[in-house]
Image (cartoon, helix red, strand yellow):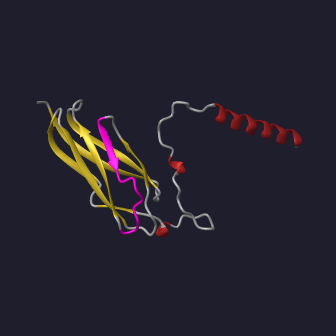
């Protein structure tokens, strides 16, 4: 029996060592696990005591655009939760989109915004894209989407 225990320990050590040895040095994606989510003493999320997004709308249709146009839209939200909301990052779904967002903590009952700037220079036809918001909400990620029909000039 000791031989199996020893073999098991060796496998665990090799697996854990392999996990740490294979890090991605050029990783640029935000790690959402560092977002602080409050938990109760028993380890369960207290969803009713957390910050919560309430968006006026989560999808925007830009309609018909001419290739090369640069347009923007602001998604407005309210923190309807019971704790301060902090947006950590807004990750665009493509390189044609840049996002700006409220960087200060949003108290319960207060408002914030996320503005997307969409460049149609390299797009044509129907475009459906999104941005992912990372915040101290549950769940930690929220998606906003937009669409457009980009025509050649």
> What secondary structure characterizes most of the magenta part?
loop
Residue 105 included in the magenta stretch of the image: yes
Q: Nearer the viewer, residue 145 or 89?
A: 89
Tell me the quarter of the picture where residue 153 sits: top left
Q: Nearer the viewer, residue 97 or 19?
A: 97
Report the residue at 23% width, 50% height from top. 60
x, y percent for residue 10: 79, 36
Report the residue at 33% width, 50% height from top. 144
Report the residue at 53% width, 56% height from top. 36
Relative to residue 134, is residue 118 depicted above or below?
above
x, y percent for residue 96: 29, 35
x, y percent for residue 91: 39, 43
State the count of labels: 0
x, y percent for residue 143: 36, 50
Q: Residue furthest right?
A: 2
Q: Which residues are magenta?
A: 96-109
């Amino acid at each position: 029996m000791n031989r199996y225990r020893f073999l098991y320990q060796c496998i665990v050590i090799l697996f854990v060592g392999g996990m740490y040895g294979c890090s991605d040095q050029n990783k640029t994606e935000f790690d959402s696990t560092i977002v602080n989510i409050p938990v109760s003493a028993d380890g369960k999320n207290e969803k009713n005591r957390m910050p919560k997004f309430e968006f006026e709308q989560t999808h925007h249709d830009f309609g018909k655009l001419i290739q090369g146009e640069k347009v923007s839209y602001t998604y407005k939200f309210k923190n309807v939760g019971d704790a301060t909301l902090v947006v950590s990052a807004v990750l665009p779904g493509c390189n044609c989109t840049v996002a700006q967002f409220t960087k200060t903590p949003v108290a319960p009952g207060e408002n914030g915004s996320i503005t997307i700037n969409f460049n149609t220079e390299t797009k044509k036809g129907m475009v459906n894209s999104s941005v992912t918001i990372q915040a101290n909400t549950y769940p930690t990620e929220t998606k906003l989407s937009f669409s457009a029909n980009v025509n050649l000039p």
